[in-house]
Image (tube, rainbow, N blue to C red):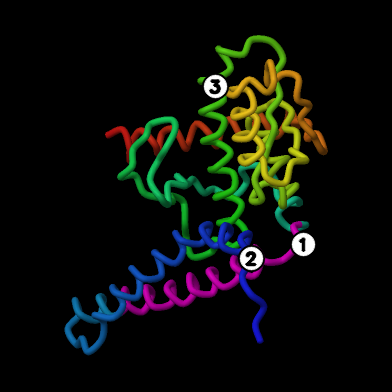
Amino acid sequence: MPAPHTSNDRDRLGLVVAVLALTAVLAATAAGCGGSKSAEEKWADSVCTNLGNWKSQVKQSTDDIAAKLRSPQQGTLAAMKADDHGLTALPFFSGERSTGWHSEARATFTGLNLSADPIEILRALLESVCYRFAAIYERLKAEAPGDTKIIASGGGILNSPVWTQMMADVIGVPVVASAVPEASSRGAAMLALEAFGQIESLDILETPLGKIFEPNARNHELYLRGRARQEMLYDLMIEN
């Protein structure tokens, strides 16, 4: 019997939604091809053939990405250079929340071509999420002067040290892995204790922490280039 899907599997499947959607579009387009005889129609047939080939490659890319997401080996991702794939993505698969709160926004890719590797698509998606967190951080840091650090929680990022390091490199500050299995539940319980007067302040409760991921200055500079491209795409696709 196949192994049951875990919550992490379901979380990670969200990363391939864009590729699946692209497969569906190409399938619908290629379905109308064939049977042409004139010069113009032969050209259209050629386009349809290329679309069909691309559809097959995208389907293979989808399968490859899903396999890589389920694999505990992330060495290939770790070995890739920062922003070295030529892709730019907006990861709004379910609309945008902070910073713009555009619920109608959708995921977008630019820079894709026939030679795009599945692992490059995955890397671009991971980086794109980090860019959005960096945009949020810039809005918050004015309210938290001095040295700051970020505590990362949630299975998606904590199960991927590569992604956690990427987050530190993009934002440019240390990211500390939370050692709390259910951070949201713990936070709600802490607020309830304070509200009912069981504790004087949240500050008296120590937060269990794990590994500290220090930012790589060279990667941070490279990611600034990727962030600039994403902001241009955001302004074009979302703000306009």
- Determine the CA span between mark 2 and mark 3: 34 Å
Name the kind of residue labelled 2 in the image.
Answer: Thr
Which residue is disc 3 drawn over?
Answer: 138
Labels 1 & 3 near each other (Cβ < 8 A): no
Which residue is disc 1 drawn over?
Answer: 73
- Determine the CA span between mark 1 and mark 2: 17 Å
Q: Secondary structure at mark 3?
A: helix
**Residue shown at 75% from the left, 47% from the top:** 161
Which quarter of the figure has residue 150?
A: top right
Q: Position of residue 152 (x, y in %)?
A: 68, 37
**Residue shown at 39% from the left, 36% from the top:** 234
Of the residues tagged 1 and 2, which is closer to the observer?
Answer: 2
Q: Position of residue 201 (x, y in %)?
A: 68, 17
Q: Give me the disc on residue 211.
A: none
- In the picture, which quadrant includes the C terminus? top left
Which residue is disc 2 drawn over?
Answer: 6
Task: Name the N-terminal-most of marks 1 and 3.
Answer: 1
Name the kind of residue labelled 1 in the image.
Answer: Gln
Q: Secondary structure at mark 2?
A: loop
112 left or right of 171 in image: left
**Residue shown at 62% from the left, 46% from the top:** 84
Which stretch is magenta? 46-74
